[in-house]
Image (cartoon, rainbow, N blue to C red):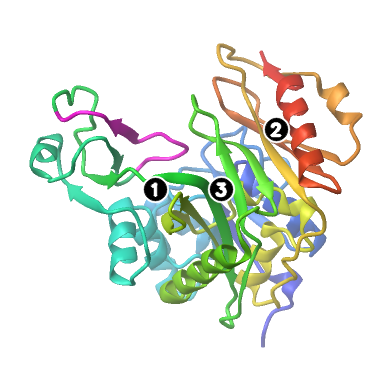
Amino acid sequence: MMKRLQDLSIGLLGGGQLGRMLLQEAANLDLKIAVMDPSEEAPCRNLTHQFVRADFRDFEAVYAFGKDKDIVTIEFEDVNTEALEELERNGVQVFPEPRILKLIKDKGSQKQFYQNHQIPTAPFVLIESKEEMLNSGMKAPFFQKIRTGGYDGYGVRKISSLENLEFAFDKPSVLETMADIKKEISVIVSRNTQGDITTFPVVEMEFNPESHMVQFLFSPSTLPNDKQEEAKNLAVKIIEALQMTGILAIEMFYLKNGEIWVNEMAPRPHNSGHHTIEANFTSQYEQHLRAITGLPLGNTGTIMPSVMVNLLGEKGYNGKPLYHGLNEVLQLPGVYIHLYGKSITKDFRKMGHATILAPTLHEAKEKGNYILNTLRIKA
């Protein structure tokens, strides 16, 4: 006999801010989610009925955590996929599927997947060491991305000249042609256990030039409608090819010549979807829960134009966070502040985000700039 939705035992690997927002949405559906994270001060710690402090990269710990669960899901990709495969063989539903995680954790495998499925992406070469770079055939400048372990800009280097490789990574890497980018965009697509698929509207991103993390997100996109449809169709093509269950965020480049190239993908709720909590009829977090529990997928339509601003730790400060300017920004109508509950701030650490809703994107952007200049996170 099938279990009631509320009786499902669900496990989440990772207890950071993405998990925190997932738990907040889970409460609305009366879903109880156990969390495993190595940090006693994980942002999810006080929002879950069961917190297990253990390393999600450890086979035995992951298997022990998941063996009595109906469903196991993730907050990010860097988890023990061998343990998840063993859980899957023993009847636990694992979403996203371990085979998807193994592919996506390796940027080289990602690029080969795009190539094999005729997904447009930047031309690339795979190398095993820095020494191979000289004979790779790539003409500088280009980007070097380590195949595994990179995140939030870490593990990416711009190689300006083959004459000086002192700062190049000496690791298995992807060498990637520099794209002539006009805009960086993202599409979040979801697929439930029945195979139904929906996409969220295209969003545009602007990055902090120093931290290389998303600083602003704008929704809806200002791209021509046909280009937005092209981006969404690419997202659908990818998740169908993967046969994946859950949420998939796909970052793309919109080039100056009008082409769209897929950059990278993440098989989980993503920074480029935080705004959906207030700005869309269904948030990315609710959609992920709907997808992995077999519920109908929700309406992804936009309620109102929005801007999302990442709230980063001030450079040069390390310690217990103080939120300077919080009172001022909370006086603005249409502003929603999400603080992640992290006990320590440091250079460019993601400490929270703000979503701004307004009748026009222009008005939302003005308020976003005000928040960026007013709300400072220091020790």
Q: Of the two numbered discs 1 and 3 on the same chain, state the one appearing first in sequence.
A: 3
Q: Do the CB atoms of the residues marked 1 and 3 lie less than 8 Å apart? A: no
Does residue 69 appear in this view?
A: no
How far apart marks 1 and 2 lie (CA) works out to: 25 Å
Compared across the picture, whether 323 is left or right of 207 comes to: right
Q: Position of residue 304 (x, y in %)?
A: 82, 54
Secondary structure, mark 2, is loop
Q: Quadrant of the N terminus?
A: bottom right
Which residue is found at the position 33% from the left and 70% from the top?
118
Q: Which residue is mark 2?
A: 341
Secondary structure, mark 3, is strand
How far apart marks 3 and 2 lie (CA) works out to: 17 Å
Q: Amino acid at mark 2?
A: Gly
Q: Of the two numbered discs 3 and 2 on the same chain, state the one appearing first in sequence.
A: 3
Q: Which residue is mark 3?
A: 36
Instruction: Tell me the crowding category of disc 2: few under 14, some 14 to 19, or many 20 or more residues within 10 angstroms, Cα based.
Output: some
Which residue is found at the position 31% from the left and 58% from the top?
111
Secondary structure, mark 1, is loop
Magenta residues, start to end: 149-162
Q: Amino acid at mark 1?
A: Asp
Compared across the picture, whether 65 is left or right of 175 comes to: right
Q: Which residue is mark 1?
A: 58
68 to 44, vertically: above or below: below
* Closer to us: 232 or 150: 232
